[in-house]
Image: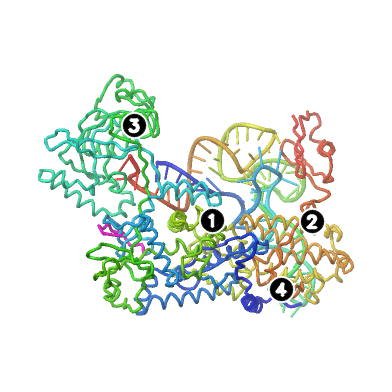
RNA sequence: GCCCGAGUGGCGGAAUGGCAGACGCGGCGGUCUCAAAAACCGCUGUCCACAAGACAUGCGGGUUCGAAUCCCGCCUCGGGCACCA
């Protein structure tokens, strides 16, 4: 017998698989399809354990499904545009492409060493013009559909990255990539109108039964739908006379409208300057506007909710009761949500309450809890201002309306009776209507960086902003750029100057590039038709392979990449290119790989475990098996090299066991059949019976577990089968082994095939050499099983008395319930003496519970 | 503050209404060996000298013949959102 030597077999088989084009996708077969995909990596250096975990999971799913008889699409590519490449180029005085492609080669070599079964002919590299050309084309389709907008508004600017960021890329006021504090700037930028799809993106989360609940929750949170109403207040002129100039607010609490005692505009509200122009209020208000710009999002995220406001000198009229209320400007109102103006109801809103307290504004109790002592005092009152309210907090939940005219006595709260009645009245009067607001903002996609996909637009002094004609795509990134000395696309003369495609006059090219997340929003569709020269993909091909059946990647993309991809899919569907609504049917978010103390591995901590080192020590198969075995895939995994060594031992043991089962182990046998004599129970025939039963049970269990991505328990079950095989070999002498030779050979074959997705090199070597099969195990069929054969003919049942196990009985699997009951009562007679047996519940195959009193 | 998830041996974890701790790591003892390593065998939740037994799935209640699992109320940890009206 040949010893298990991963260093020898792994490179040899990898070469053999490549030569035989084993992983090439079969495009024409009529088998059912599976699209198995892992999030493509950013080529930032060599791969780390997180990648190994992510891609080991995907490879098991892909290999398992090939054996199950599916046509499997399992591609790999690189998310190759982005800032790290540019920073590396500046540091090394070279070009981002040099660094990027070198890293791609490194990572690709590591993937091959891990034995991942990708169809390398389908590789998509995001910075390749063959790919980004179609990213530009898609951008123009979005533009045609009115989903591209260029507009001036306050944006998030990262001073570290020297570019703007999308809302999704700002985490607690800091840049997602470099952690710099993000600043607000007023800039003209390009947007994708993802908000047009807000409702559908929210609704379709319900379709995603194969997604983790927490991811769907996070997306729903991010989209943030609120049902409420728009209410129009009439502005008074400088002398306090009502005009027909209306200012609109959004509110979810129209029920509290009678409690509105002031009105607040965000500092960025467009009309602020106009309202205070030339008055004594002008300076303090404009000072406040300036000061509020300096409050950073980081300060806000840290919970600094000190509110600042100034009176504008103006008033508005409350449409529900004609009351005149003062207009303030305050920094607690968010400018780009709703209308940027709010009605303030201190009684019903905690923020308004705090503001009213600080600036001594009236608090009108209009909603009270049922046992509130004020309830009695206010009976029959209207608009009684109680500045000395006995509470410290606003009553912002449900309650009963008081001092609210005809609505007094109704229930108040979100979606309450009172709210419905007041909105109806406003609608009647033409002063309000139902409105739904979303927290989701449009996706800011332009970036002021070189290493990205150029936005295909031209600025013409005559014609304005015009798209580059489709036949002129792609707009190529210029290769000759000296980033180290500060050159940018905007300073690149040759790139900038062009002619207008409309009028033919001189024009300037757009110099912003697209957010890298545009690249990752559709790469999975390009994999279905990666070499297409005429379109991003052929619709028939995309519709055949898509949606992705199993997508695997990190939880950090719960909002960013996954939301953008869902958006792209829906737009491309509306363009007529796709016939489905959602790109990823099943999503698995794998947990992080941490060091033995539970800390994140990082270079600065010096606790990084290099995959390469582990492959050298134990082989790629052991690394794969270990990572899948040690924890459920979605949980974090604490690195423990003893565990890896244990899994390696398991592979060595089964390697020898397979030879033993086949009777070809020779000197290397684990259990010498000649040495078997006075071993303890079980008898060889019983061990053989158990082994046969286990063979069927375990195949059933592993099949089920792989289908449900429970890799850790699948591997545990394979270990159980190996243990049963070991128990048989330990007690069987040569003659007994000969009698069970067929079954033993079958068990050996089953063990090898069950482990083939997990340990592909190990399995293929055994399959072809020890088991003597022609061709690769990865073209073999998944073992079948007979559930009947997995059943024992005699089973042990626990006998409980009032829920406590008091005895055990052995019964035939086919025994009638009454016989079991009788046998059980007999077994626990000591416990029933002198007591009443109320009933005995028989759970077939498990236990009997006798209830006595 | 709002929303979601998780708490089980020394450790990673298993069991989603039916014998808690599968499988593995670690530990202890043994076989082999001059010895060690490797390999193989056995034991390994806690209390108790052993047995018997009792106690054990974050805490407190409840439903049930039976609860780690379902329900109610807490505690702790992790994650998301957050001045979004």
Q: Disc 3 to disc 2, how far (Cα)?
A: 69 Å
State the SS at label 3.
helix
Q: Quadrant of the N terminus of chain A?
A: bottom right
| Residue receiving disc 1 | A587
Mark 1 and 4 residues: CB-CB less than 8 Å, in contact? no
Q: What x and y, as percent, mark residue A402?
A: 32, 25
| Residue receiving disc 4 | A775
Q: What x and y, as percent, mark residue A445?
A: 35, 60
* Front disc: 1 or 4: 4
Name the residue nearer the viewer: A685 or A490. Answer: A490
Q: Disc 3 to disc 4, how far (Cα)?
A: 73 Å
Residues in magenta, as a range: A178-189
| Residue receiving disc 2 | A693
Number of numbered callouts drawn: 4
Marks 1 and 4, the one that precedes in the sequence: 1
Q: What x and y, as percent, mark residue A480?
A: 33, 79
Q: Is residue A188 magenta?
A: yes
């Amino acid at each position: 017998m040949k010893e298990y030597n991963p260093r020898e077999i792994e490179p040899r088989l990898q070469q053999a698989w490549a030569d035989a084009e084993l992983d090439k996708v079969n495009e024409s077969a009529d088998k059912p399809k599976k699209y198995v995909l892992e999030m493509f990596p950013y080529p930032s250096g060599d791969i780390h354990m997180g990648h190994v975990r992510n891609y080991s999971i995907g490879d098991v799913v892909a290999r398992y499904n090939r054996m199950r008889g599916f046509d499997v699409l399992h591609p790999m590519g690189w998310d190759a545009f982005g800032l790290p490449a540019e920073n590396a180029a500046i540091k090394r005085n070279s070009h981002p492409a040099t660094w990027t492609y070198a890293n791609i080669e490194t990572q690709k070599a590591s993937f091959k060493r891990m034995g991942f079964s990708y169809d390398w002919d389908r590789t998509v590299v995001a910075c390749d013009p063959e790919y980004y050309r179609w990213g530009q084309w898609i951008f123009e389709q979005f533009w045609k559909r009115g989903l591209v907008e260029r507009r001036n508004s306050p944006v998030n600017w990262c001073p570290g990255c020297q570019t703007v960021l999308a809302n999704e890329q700002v985490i607690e006021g800091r840049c997602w990539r470099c952690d710099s504090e993000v600043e607000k700037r007023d800039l003209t930028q390009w947007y994708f109108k993802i908000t047009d799809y807000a409702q559908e993106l929210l609704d379709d989360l319900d379709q995603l039964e194969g997604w983790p609940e927490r991811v769907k929750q996070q997306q729903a949170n991010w989209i943030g739908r609120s049902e409420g109403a728009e209410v129009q207040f009439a502005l008074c002129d400088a002398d306090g006379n009502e005009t027909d100039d209306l200012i609109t607010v959004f509110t979810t609490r129209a029920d509290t409208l009678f409690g509105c005692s002031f009105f607040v505009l965000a500092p960025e509200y467009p009309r602020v300057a106009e309202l205070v122009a030339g008055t004594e209020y002008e300076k303090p208000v404009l000072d406040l506007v300036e000061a509020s710009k300096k409050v950073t999002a980081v300060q806000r995220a840290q919970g600094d909710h000190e509110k600042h406001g100034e009176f504008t000198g103006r008033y508005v009229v409350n449409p529900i009761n004609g009351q005149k209320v003062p207009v303030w400007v305050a920094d607690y109102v968010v400018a780009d949500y709703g209308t940027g103006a709010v009605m303030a109801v201190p009684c019903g809103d905690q923020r308004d309450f705090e503001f009213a307290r600080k600036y001594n504004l009236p608090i009108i109790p209009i909603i009270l809890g049922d046992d509130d002592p004020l309830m009695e005092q206010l009976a029959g009152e209207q608009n009684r201002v109680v500045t000395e309210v006995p509470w410290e907090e606003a009553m912002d939940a449900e309650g009963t309306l008081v001092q609210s005219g005809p609505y007094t006595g109704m229930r108040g709260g979100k979606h309450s009776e009172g709210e419905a009645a007041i909105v109806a009245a406003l609608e009647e009067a033409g002063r309000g209507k139902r409105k739904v607001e979303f927290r989701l903002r449009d996706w800011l996609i332009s970036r002021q960086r070189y290493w990205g996909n150029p936005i295909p637009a031209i600025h013409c002094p005559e014609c304005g902003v015009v798209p580059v004609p489709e036949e002129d795509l792609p707009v190529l990134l210029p290769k000759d750029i000296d980033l180290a000395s500060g050159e940018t696309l905007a300073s690149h003369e040759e790139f900038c100057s062009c002619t207008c495609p409309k009028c033919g006059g001189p024009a300037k090219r757009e110099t912003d590039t697209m957010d890298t997340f545009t690249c990752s929003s559709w790469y999975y569709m390009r994999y279905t038709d990666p070499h297409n020269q005429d379109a991003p993909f052929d619709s028939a091909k995309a519709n055949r392979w898509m949606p992705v059946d199993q997508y695997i990647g990190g939880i950090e993309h719960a909002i960013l990449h996954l939301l953008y991809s869902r958006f792209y899919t829906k737009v491309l569907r509306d363009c007529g290119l796709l016939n489905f609504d959602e790109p990823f049917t099943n999503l698995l978010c794998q947990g992080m790989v941490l060091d033995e103390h539970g800390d994140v591995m990082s270079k600065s901590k010096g606790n990084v475990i290099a995959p390469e080192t582990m492959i050298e020590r134990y082989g790629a198969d052991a690394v794969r098996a270990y990572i899948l075995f040690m924890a459920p895939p979605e949980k974090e995994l604490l690195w423990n090299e003893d565990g890896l060594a244990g899994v390696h031992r398991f592979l060595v043991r089964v390697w020898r066991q397979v030879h033993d089962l086949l009777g070809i182990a020779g000197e290397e046998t684990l259990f010498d059949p000649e040495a078997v004599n006075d071993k303890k129970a079980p008898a060889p025939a019983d061990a053989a019976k158990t082994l046969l039963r286990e063979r069927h049970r375990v195949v059933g269990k592993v099949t089920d577990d792989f289908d449900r991505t429970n890799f850790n328990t699948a591997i545990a079950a394979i270990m159980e089968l190996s243990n049963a095989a070991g128990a048989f070999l330990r007690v069987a002498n040569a003659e007994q082994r000969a009698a069970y030779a067929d079954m033993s050979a079958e068990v050996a074959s089953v063990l090898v095939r069950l482990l083939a997705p997990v340990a592909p090199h190990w399995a293929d070597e055994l399959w072809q050499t020890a088991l003597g099969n022609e061709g690769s195990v990865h073209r073999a069929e998944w073992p079948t099983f007979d559930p009947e054969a997995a059943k024992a003919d005699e089973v042990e049942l626990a006998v409980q008395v009032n829920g406590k196990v008091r005895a055990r009985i052995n019964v035939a699997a086919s025994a009638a319930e009454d016989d079991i009951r009788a046998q059980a009562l007999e077994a626990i007679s000591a416990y029933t003496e002198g007591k009443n047996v109320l009933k005995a519940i028989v759970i077939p195959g498990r236990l009997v519970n006798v209830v006595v009193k």
